[in-house]
Amino acid sequence: MRKILTIALSLVMLFGVVNQAFAHPGALDELGGHFRKSDCTYFLHKPTSIARKAKNMQELIALIKKYNSNSTCTRGLNANKVVLEGFTFSNSKPSSKTPSTQTKPSAKPATTKKVALPAIKINSKHTVKVIRVIDGDTVEVQFSNKAVATVRMIGVNTPETVHPNKPVEKYGKEASNYTKKRLTNKTVTLEFDVQIKDKYGRLLAYVWIGKELYNETLVKEGYANVMTIQPNVKYQKRFLVAEQAARKAKKGLWK
């Protein structure tokens, strides 16, 4: 009977060891941690002096990549894959000063209130300053009341250069650079049509530089093609004539 109990106890102890080894296989590295092989999660069990040098998660990840030899797991290591197990970074420790010696907390910085756009009506015009060119057909402007907005030019389309899901398209950089040269820091007039904004919240407008309709210029010089979207069609015929001329002259997109 005693022999049976001894064997059973040995099996229980052996199972516990095996189970623990399976959960966290591998010896500790120089930082005092290791990877769980099943999903490459890094556990910092016993932080060493090397690990304590890290002031933040980014520095700790850099140390893990330096000192841990598991290249498969370190290659894709990120903060979500690191378990600190109670470890805190050196710059997150509370101050040792007593309340009497601590300086008074500074007042909260005043938040910058966003300035609302002026009232924009159908077919209205507004004078603005172009403060940034985003793309060949898209700019950021500032109104006289300091409100800032993104403007997408109506009726035309230049090749993409900043689309999150598309590569830079042919002649896109040329179109963007041309608009930067022509409009950056310039005072222009925005003329609105029937629809004031698109589905992305951008203002839709014709851009005038004095008596020059810049939307039309982009098409005429071959930097853009006509893109008509109802109900904004006020200058559609002008744009189509400009595109035919650019095609005939083999300018820009039509080379």
Image (cartoon, helix red, strand yellow):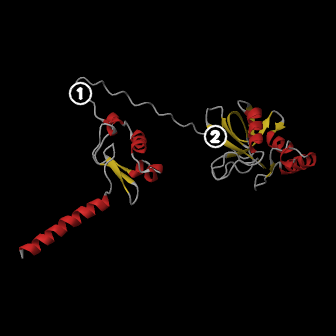
* Of the image marks 2 and 1, the number of the one nearer the N terminus: 1
Query: In the structure shown, which secondary structural element does the residue marked by tag 2 occupy?
Result: strand
Q: Which residue has dot 1 on it?
A: 99
Q: Quadrant of residue 116?
A: top right
Residue 118 shows in the view:
no
Above or below residue 217? Residue 104 is above
Q: Give how far across and how far down residue 7 sits, in percent.
A: 14, 71
Residue 53 shows in the view:
yes
Q: Amino acid at mark 1?
A: Pro
Q: Specify the farthest residue to the front.
A: 3
Q: Nearer the viewer, residue 28 or 123?
A: 28
Number of marks present in the image shown: 2
**Which residue corresponds to the image point at 93% horizontal and 48% vertical from the top-left?**
248
Q: Which residue has dot 2 on it?
A: 149
Above or below residue 136? Residue 199 is below
Q: Nearer the viewer, residue 17 or 109?
A: 17
Q: Give how far across and how far down residue 113 sits, in percent.
A: 51, 35
